[in-house]
Image (tube, coloured by chain):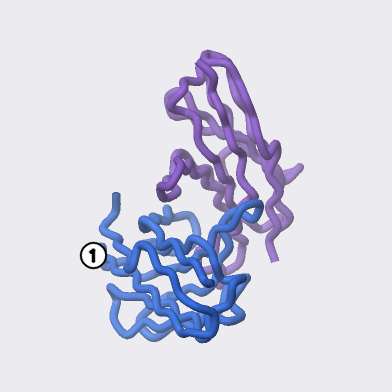
Chain colours: A blue, B purple
């Protein structure tokens, strides 16, 4: 597996609380992505980053924000968690865009009560 | 934006049989089509990919075919084994210089190989 870690791996939180998930890579890859995985929906892109401090929205970005202050870390924040954000969150990295493999992290399982 | 449809949603085969999973995409400018395998509780892992300038690619028991005219691509697994049981996802990257590698995934196919 590529050098990608996610923390925490599991989290239970309450509705209305802020939550931050961390993705850390040791590959020095430029591109990083956050996806969520839900039954029947496959994986859907939340936000992505194409460089330090360069981020943009994906398909399902409402209620989420991201930050990337250094190459190796990409943070995903749920500003005020809702039950609909209960999901498995995967981070991915890529050395370049277009026809280049994306490597996924181990995932974070989030339960919002 | 890009839309990827994947069929079937579940597929059950006997060990040794072949399995075929099909995906269609909407953006004719899409140029990269990976397939991921995800075992229960694990991360998606790339098993094969194909680029738009290639019609077919093989890797041992796995092959992928691409029909750009019809905008569909398929995963073929021959001589299936129980360890092939997993969820398989197709994906596509939309064309254009600002795609930034944004994958659009199909809904997934649960493949079960019975011994």
Q: Chain of mark 1?
A: A
Q: Please tell me whether mark 1 sits on a helix, a strand or a loop.
A: loop
Residue B64 versus residue B96 in the image, above or below: above
For the point 45% across and 48% down, which residue is it?
B44
Q: Is residue B37 left or right of residue B89?
A: left
Q: Position of residue B77 (x, y in %)?
A: 54, 26
Q: Position of residue B37 (x, y in %)?
A: 48, 41
For the point 49% across and 66% down, which residue is it?
A111
Can residue B51 be seen here? yes
For the point 59% across and 37% down, which residue is it?
B110
Q: Is residue B23 left or right of residue A23?
A: right
Q: Quadrant of the N terminus of chain B?
A: bottom right
Q: Is residue B76 left or right of residue A10?
A: right
Residue B47 versus residue A41 in the image, above or below: above
Q: Position of residue B114 (x, y in %)?
A: 54, 19
Can residue B68 be seen here? no
Pointer 1: what residue?
A: A26
Task: Work out which residue is located at the far right of the displayed protein and give it.
Answer: B70
Given residues A72 and A40, the one toward you in this image is: A40
Q: How many marks can you see?
A: 1
For the point 42% across and 46% down, which residue is it?
B45
Task: Work out which residue is located at the far left of the displayed protein and give it.
Answer: A26
Given residues B73 and B53, the one toward you in this image is: B73
Given residues B94 and A36, the one toward you in this image is: A36
């Amino acid at each position: 597996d590529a050098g990608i870690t996610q923390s925490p791996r599991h989290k239970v939180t309450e509705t209305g609380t802020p939550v931050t998930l961390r993705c850390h890579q040791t590959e020095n890859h430029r591109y990083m992505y956050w996806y969520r995985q839900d039954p029947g929906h496959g994986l859907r892109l939340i936000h992505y980053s194409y460089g330090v401090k360069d981020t943009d929205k994906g398909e399902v970005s409402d209620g989420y924000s991201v930050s990337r202050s250094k190459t190796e870390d990409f943070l995903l924040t749920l500003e005020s968690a809702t039950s609909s954000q209960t999901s498995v969150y995967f981070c991915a990295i890529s050395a370049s865009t277009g026809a280049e493999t994306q490597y996924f992290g181990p995932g974070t399982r989030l339960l919002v009560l | 934006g890009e839309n990827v449809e994947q069929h079937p949603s579940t597929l059950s085969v006997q060990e040794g049989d072949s399995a075929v999973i099909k995906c269609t995409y909407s953006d004719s400018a899409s140029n990269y089509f990976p397939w991921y395998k995800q075992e229960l509780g694990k991360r998606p892992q790339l098993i094969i990919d194909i680029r738009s300038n290639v019609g077919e690619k093989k890797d041992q028991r796995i092959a992928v075919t691409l029909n750009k005219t019809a905008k569909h691509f398929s995963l073929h697994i021959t001589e299936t084994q129980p360890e092939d049981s997993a969820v398989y996802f197709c994906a596509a990257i939309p064309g254009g210089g600002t795609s930034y590698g944004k994958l659009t995934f199909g809904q997934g196919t649960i493949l079960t190989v019975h011994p």
